[in-house]
Image: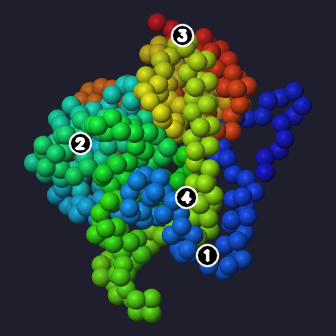
Amino acid sequence: MSAPAAQGVDAPLPLHRPVLGPEEEAAVAAVLRSGYLVQGPRVAEFEALVGAALGLEYAVATSSGTSALHLALLALGVGPGDEVVVPAFGFPATGNAVELCGARAVLADIDPDSFAMTERSAASAVGPRTVGLMPVHPFGIPAPMDALERLAARSGLWLCEDAACALGTATRDAEGRSRWAGGAHPVCLSFHPRKTITTGEGGLVATADGAMAATLRELRNHGISADADRGWRRFVRAGFNYRLSDLAAAVGVVQMGRLSQIVDDRRRVLALYLDALRGQAGLRVPSGYGAGALSAQSFVVELDADVDRDAVIAALGARGVQTTVGGYALAEQPYYVQRAALRMEDFPVAARMARSSLTLPLSGAMTAQDVARVVEALSGALAQARRRR
């Protein structure tokens, strides 16, 4: 437990604080009393709840969002010699999962207002070895799924959504029907503490394909046949221990019961930010945050080119407001530079966002006063952090 703030001193504002309470404590205590701590009935219950929320029949919980991505790719048959198109900006887990399959992650530049890869950039990244597209819904902002679906269809590619940040984000399909982020394609989620709901660490793959779900379950659990009798195990493939524990799933079950409230609280905080930062000098709020009913996992703004981002982060930190960079350009990360002949100028928007994006605190627990405090501190920091010309 952190120490209380001194009188007259504001408590630190972290990037995110998961909303947990006595219900989660009671759920974990019940699992401890049961003596059944590993993957079991609470995992099955959690899977059913998430699958129902996404409108997909099968849901397979995993130990993390990254393991969910890895298993989904393996179940889709990705292997050496294959290429998968992923966004050039964000967190490297998506590209890393492709590389862990022995395949190559090919980068596609992003849109500056959604942070998602565009249909045009993805199309230019498709080559003779491309087998699929793995779009990300960055920070909870939906990727342009209709356009990417058309690209996948005409190119003969599968599509798998990295919706790690987007549980609770509503998108619309080609007929205008509302749906959660994640659709007819396999969708991967994360339950890290900074995501919409949390299990501490955890992930999940949801799909409409029963055969894929069976493969996922085998890969998750050491390659044990999904239809093996309880008393007799058959190891049908080389698998992993990517299981989620009942301890973690018990927290997730409670969180899913509050999903609507959690999403509403995030939307409330996002709306406060959008209103307070309207017309703020020194930054730009990407318009994707105002496009539809989204559950913002993070609130990321773009600083003007003449603003020293490091100075802004330091100034906000001195006032107890935690901030960080918005994301990473994969084309400048050492692993990817060594793996392929990448040039940052081929990904101009990703390069720009890597230099200028800033993540502000966002949590459903934040109050209007918290948002006002962040905005006031940010405004002061921006005024002082302009680089000399």
The numbered mark, 3 or 2, whose residue comes first in the sequence reads 2
Within 10 angstroms of label 2, few (less than 14), some, or many (20 or more) residues?
some
State the residue in front, 219 or 36: 36
Answer whether labels 4 and 3 touch (C-beta < 8 Å). Answer: no
State the residue in front, 227 or 118: 227
Q: What is the number of the mark on residue 201?
A: 4
Q: Measured from the top left, where is residue 346 in percent x and y?
A: 24, 30
Q: Measured from the top left, where is residue 254 in percent x and y?
A: 63, 58
Q: In the current view of this chain or complex, which residue is farthest to the bottom? A: 231
Between disc 3 and disc 2, the foreground one is: 2
Between disc 4 and disc 1, the foreground one is: 1
Could you tell me the amino acid type at mark 4? Answer: Glu
Residue at point 39%, 77% (across, down) = 222
Could you tell me the amino acid type at mark 3? Answer: Gly
The numbered mark, 3 or 1, whose residue comes first in the sequence reads 1
Reading the image, the residue beneath label 3 is 279
The numbered mark, 4 or 3, whose residue comes first in the sequence reads 4
Q: Measured from the top left, where is residue 157 in percent x and y?
A: 18, 50
Using the rendered view, name the quadrant where residue 42 is placed.
bottom right
Reading the image, the residue beneath label 1 is 37
**Alpha-carbon span between mark 1 and mark 2:** 40 Å
The secondary element bearing badge 4 is classed as loop
Reading the image, the residue beneath label 2 is 149
State the residue in front, 345 or 236: 236
Residue at point 67%, 47% (across, down) = 19
The numbered mark, 4 or 2, whose residue comes first in the sequence reads 2
**Alpha-carbon span between mark 4 and mark 3:** 38 Å
Could you tell me the amino acid type at mark 2? Answer: Glu
Q: What is the number of the mark on residue 223?
A: none
